[in-house]
Amino acid sequence: MAGAGAGAVFSVGSAVVSSNFEGEQRTRAFAFLGSVAGLSLAFGPSLCGLLTQLSGWRLVYGFQLACLVVACAGMPLIRRAAAHEKRHAARIDWAGAALFCTATTVTLGGLALGSATGWASPPFLLCTAVGIGCYGLFAWRESIAPNPLLSLGTLRSRRFSGITLVVAVASFTFTNAVAYLPVFFQGAYGASAGASGAYLMFLTLPVLVAPLIAARMTARGTPAHTIFTWSIGLLVVGLVLAGATASPGLAWMTLPMVVVGIGFGLQAGLVDGEALAHVPADEAGMGAGWINTVRLGSEAIAVSLFGSLFASFAGDADDASRGGFAAITIGSTLCAAALGVVSVLLMRRPGPTAPAADPRAADRVG
């Protein structure tokens, strides 16, 4: 239920911002959105660690409930801002949705089975094969469906496809770091929950400032693909250094964590707006949905894969645990580097900036 709600908020939020701002105002709006996300990333993990240490983990969910109440109180503002938009009845391709959900569920289940039964075990191989097959059937279904969840024509924009891969790079680098560094600090260095959350701020605080820097660079004429290239480079180099410096000691990881945070922040407030600029206005909702499907789907796969390997030594407070963490961190970063190379090549290749508008799209905006 939480995942369904998060997916809806991500998709609708990006589409609302995209359709209510234009030009430089839209760049600033997405930069502000990225900074707000950076604010939550900067202080959320640290605050949750402190709450856990003071009163137990249940208080974290009480704090989240309070945040949700405040967010719901602001919904009338969004309704007024979007009052001018035309509304259309939504038609959902339920068969496509079922195929995509099945493919993702089976793939993630396979990763969990691979960790438990071995990466060459029949259950893992079967789940992987079924997952790939369902993804293939989903692509076929979307090519023939009268009201597809995803218009494959949207993906023909090389720049749009390249930009969406930037968020996958972040999943295999920054997201994995946020998810597992606090556990690693507690297991390998004996840090408390509060101290681990506080130390994580070296990674998250730069995300508060970097989106504004990226917006200023864009306003001064720096091409977006150049900023994304720097972002990918900083994410990859920073996390490799973080893995390599895990054994010498906690202090050695400080600078690499800052580098990773800056790399993520440079794209956090820019990627959605820049990607949607290469999608027809009547397909903004579909484009935003796909960006966040890539974002959340790659996060789920990256965190599951990283976690299944990390679990084997997470509780060890010795040099072996640090070496194992370094190995899987660098391995995860190599996957991110491969995605980053493809992303940069797609963003720099000439081609149409946006696919032609589909006359059926009006039925899909709702």
Image (tube, helix red, strand yellow):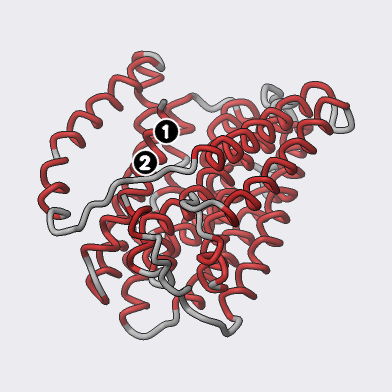
Disc 1 marks which amino acid? Ala
Q: Residue at 61% across / 74% down in the picture?
A: 346
| Label 1 SS | helix
Q: Is residue 174 visible?
A: yes
On screen, residue 12 versus residue 49, left or right, reads left
Q: Residue at 57% across / 73% down in the picture?
A: 158
Q: Is residue 210 visible?
A: no
Which of the numbered marks, if any, corresponds to residue 8? 2
Q: Is residue 141 above or below residue 278?
A: above
Q: Position of residue 291 (x, y in %)?
A: 47, 55
Q: Residues within 10 Å of mark 2 (few under 14, many from 20)?
A: few
Q: Are marks 2 and 1 in contact (CB under 8 Å)?
A: yes
Q: Quadrant of residue 45?
A: top left
Q: Quadrant of residue 223?
A: bottom left
Q: Is residue 160 above or below residue 324?
A: below
Q: Residue at 38% across / 53% down in the picture?
A: 364
Disc 2 marks which amino acid? Ala
Q: Dot 1 corresponds to which residue? A: 4
242 or 229: nearer the eye?
A: 229
Q: Is residue 254 above or below residue 112?
A: below
On screen, residue 167 versus residue 60, left or right, reads right
On screen, residue 107 versus residue 196, left or right, reads right
On screen, residue 28 versus residue 145, left or right, reads left
